[in-house]
Image (spheres, rainbow, N blue to C red):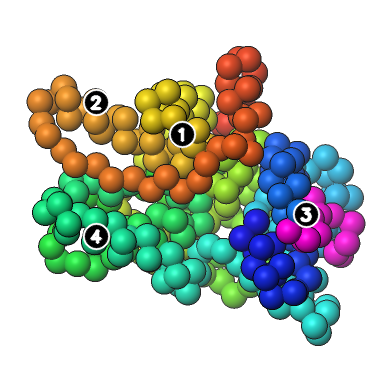
Amino acid sequence: SAVALACAYFDLEAMIYMVRISYEQKQYRGTLMRTYGAKIVPSPSDLTEYGRKVKKEKPDHPGTLGIAISEALEDTVNHENTKYTLGSVLNFVMLHQSVIGQETIAQFDSIDETPDYIIGCVGGGSNFAGLAYPFMADDRFRDTKFIAAEPTACPSLTKGEYRYDFGDTAGLTPKLKMYTLGADFTPPKIHAGGLRYHGVAPSISALVEEGRITPYAFNQIDVLNAGVLFAKSEGIVPAPESAHAIKAVIDIALESKKAKESRTIVFNLSGHGHFDMLAYSDLMDGTLNGDVPEGIS
């Protein structure tokens, strides 16, 4: 939606390949983008050679972020007047997002406090890096612990391999050294669509490998229950992605209470859940399932 709005401001045509399962689960997100003037296509689509190949092999394929990237790249290289934009994984995105952490540090400075934990959800990694990296670069916070929360349905950091892999499914991108489940990995149809990516930003992956970031994985029922608790407490319905961070916060807060320790915990509420009410409806109706990925033990 940010790309759609930016294109509207600059009078540019926006073509967005939206992962099919997210296109179906978050229909009003698509409506918002169309309101801004963008064209939305569920991926895999019939508009690209790779999309047609995927659909021929599996007509009901739910799509992945890797496939959507492949389609967008193919579209770009086949049209001279087209530019490709990506909102996660790469270093320049992390840099842009770092305003989040910089502003958070300024808030802590104003109250003379230091966080014990910095927590964010991780798919590609941009919102987590945006919050955490300014803290990690500041020696004042060397004792702060950094927690990355991901879904058990797509456990790139907790069960993936640290190696070179393509950033997309078709193998069009340069290879990146990162934690990956494999470029052809298809996660279950969880509602946290922004976390259904096979890999993680190379810089975050390196920091996990070095032990600077600790990853945890949570299943979507526990995550959405954490989102409900947060909504009841704060009046804000979080996006399923953000609710992963909230689940980690709750667990650490309960551990602190049990240990009778006072801890300052910061997390990134990376998005609202107003377009994700189907997720909460499924939770309350008892119809959520299928968040255990195939081939991952």
- Please name the residue that numbered disc 3 is placed on: 34
Spatial CA span between label 2 and label 1 = 21 Å
Q: Secondary structure at mark 2?
A: helix
2 or 1: mark nearer the eye: 1
Neighbourhood count class around disc 3 (C-alpha, 10 Å): few under 14, some 14–19, many 20 upward: some
User: Dot 4 surroundings within 10 Å: few (below 14), some, or many (20 or more)?
Assistant: some
Near mark 1 (Cα within 10 A), the count class, few <14, some 14-19 or many ≥20, is: some
Identify residue for label 2: 254
> Residue at left 69%, top 75%?
10
Q: Cα distance, mark 1 to mark 4?
A: 23 Å
Disc 3, SS: helix
Between residue 97 and residue 165, name the one nearer to us: 97
Residue 173 is at least partly visible in this image: yes
Tell me the quadrant of the picture where the N terminus can be found: bottom right
Q: Residue at x 53, y 62 (%)?
A: 88
Cα distance in 3D space between marks 4 and 3: 36 Å
Q: Is residue 11 above or below residue 288?
A: below
**Residue 233 appears in which quarter of the rendering?**
top left
Mark 2 vs 3: CB contact within 8 A? no
Q: Which mark is residue 105?
A: 4
Disc 1 from disc 3: Cα separation: 25 Å
Provide the residue designation for mark 1: 236
Q: Earlier in the sequence, mark 1 or mark 4?
A: 4
Q: CA distance from mark 4 to mark 2?
A: 25 Å
Q: Which residues are magenta?
A: 36-49
Where residue 242 sits in the image (x, y, percent)? 46, 42
